[in-house]
Image (cartoon, rainbow, N blue to C red):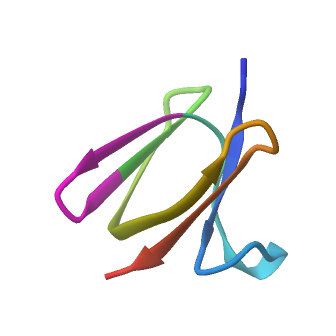
Amino acid sequence: MCLSTVYKGSKSDDNVCAKYVAKIDVDGDTLTFTDVLGEVTKVEGRLVSADLTAGVVVFDAA
């Protein structure tokens, strides 16, 4: 199973939005990140990149 850390803007410890993310849903400008325990984080923005092998997802806020 590939779990990812989600960052706002750029990959930096100060920009972590969610950890251990197992699922990403996109509905227009709404991004929904669900972690392995089922906790949901919703943000407004757009995906910039997703490197699932490295476990890194980056988004820009709307």
For the point 17% across and 58% down, the residue is: 28
- Residue 57 percent across, percent down from the top left: 62, 55
Quadrant position of the N terminus in the picture: top right
The answer to if 29 sits in the magenta stretch is yes
First to last magenta residue range: 23-31
For the point 29% across and 48% down, the residue is: 26
Left or right of residue 1: residue 9: left
Residue extending farthest to the top is 1
- Residue 7 percent across, percent down from the top left: 64, 67
Q: Residue 9 versus residue 42: which sits nearer the camera?
A: 9
- Residue 19 percent across, percent down from the top left: 69, 48
Q: In this view, does 41 lie above or below 34?
A: below
Q: Residue 14 versus residue 29: which sits nearer the camera?
A: 29
The answer to if 36 sits in the magenta stretch is no
Q: In this view, does 50 lie above or below 4?
A: below
Residue extending farthest to the left is 28
Left or right of residue 20: residue 47: left
Q: Mostly what secondary structure, the magenta segment? A: strand
Q: How many marks?
A: 0
Residue 12 falls in image quadrant: bottom right
Q: In this view, does 19 lie above or below 20?
A: below
For the point 59% across and 26% down, the residue is: 37
Residue 2 falls in image quadrant: top right
Quadrant position of the C terminus in the picture: bottom left
- Residue 56 percent across, percent down from the top left: 72, 53
